[in-house]
Image (spheres, rainbow, N blue to C red):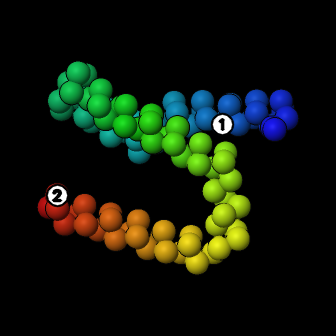
Amino acid sequence: MLSFDLLLAFTLFAFVTSITPGPNNMMLLASGVNFGFSRTLPHMLGISIGFFVLVLAVGFGLGSVFKAWPLLYTILRYVGAAYLLYLVCCFT
């Protein structure tokens, strides 16, 4: 179980990263300007769910799994890069 100090620090970090202008917030701004608020809601929901899943995965010890099997981490990086290249090819 996490100590209260660690949980408080993590909660503060999660809050600050969710409101600071970064790539997700800039994409949402552009999407809202171009398509309107109602058509941007699914995008906002996807970002929120993705952040939640990421936090859950780290919380359940995915970092320990990657430390135990570094090859798995390398494979996941290459698969992620290949998927991003696939998306680039599809949208251009």
> Which one is nearer the viewer's eye here, 16 or 50?
50
**CB atoms of marks 1 and 2 within 8 Å:** no
Say how many tags the image has. 2
Q: CA distance from mark 1 to mark 2?
A: 33 Å
Residue farthest to the left, as pictured: 92
Spot occupied by residue 14 in the image (x, y as percentages of width and height): 61, 35
Spot occupied by residue 23 in the image (x, y as percentages of width and height): 41, 45
Residue at the spot x=23%, y=21% of the render? 38
Q: Is residue 74 visible?
A: yes
Left/right placement of residue 30 relative to residue 70 reads: left
Which residue, given by chain and number where applicable, does mark 1 sit on? 13
Residue farthest to the top, as pictured: 38
> Which one is nearer the viewer's eye here, 83 or 64?
64
Q: Judge the density around disc 2: few (<14), some (14-19), many (≥20) Cα neighbours within 10 Å.
A: few
Residue type, numbered disc 1: Phe
- Per the image, label 2 sits on a secondary structure element best described as helix
Residue at the spot x=41%, y=65% of the render? 80
Left/right placement of residue 72 relative to residue 46 reads: right
- Per the image, label 1 sits on a secondary structure element best described as helix
**What label does residue 91 carry, if any?**
2
Q: Quadrant of residue 70?
A: bottom right
Residue farthest to the bottom, as pictured: 71
Quadrant in the picture for the C terminus: bottom left
User: Upstream in the sequence, badge 1 or badge 2?
Assistant: 1
Q: Quadrant of residue 2?
A: top right
> Which one is nearer the viewer's eye here, 86 or 27?
86
